Amino acid sequence: MEIQPNEVYTAEEAQEILKISKSTMKRLVKNGLIKANKIGGRYRILGKDLLHTISPAIESRTVNFYLKIKKKIKEKVEDW
């Protein structure tokens, strides 16, 4: 399963992606190793935070790619 940086995942989906148990997931969130927000009583986790957990280098490449695309789009729009 490919992690999408701008996608929002449930704790259960994140567990499946990371192949960890429910207790491990709770521990990672509680200790701040995975950033999660509680919405409607359930945790939601951004894909970029999962990427950072797996490999900070992957997250960095993803952000750099996004910024390059954003810059190109901005230049094209300014030409209009």
Image (cartoon, rainbow, N blue to C red):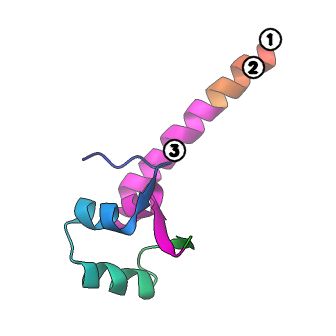
Q: Please name which of the two marks, 1 or 3, marks the residue nearer to the observer.
A: 1
Q: Secondary structure at mark 3?
A: helix
At which x and y percent is residue 17?
A: 26, 59
Q: Is residue 74 left or right of residue 8?
A: right
At which x and y percent is residue 1?
A: 24, 47
Q: Is residue 67 left or right of residue 56?
A: right
Question: What residue does disc 2 label?
Answer: 77
Quarter of the rendering occupied by the C terminus: top right
Question: What residue does disc 3 label?
Answer: 64
At which x and y percent is residue 51?
A: 38, 58
Q: Please name which of the two marks, 2 or 3, marks the residue nearer to the observer.
A: 2
Question: What residue does disc 1 label?
Answer: 80
Residues shaded magenta: 41-70
Q: Secondary structure at mark 1?
A: loop
For this rendering, which residue is in front, 16 or 48? 16
Q: Secondary structure at mark 2?
A: helix
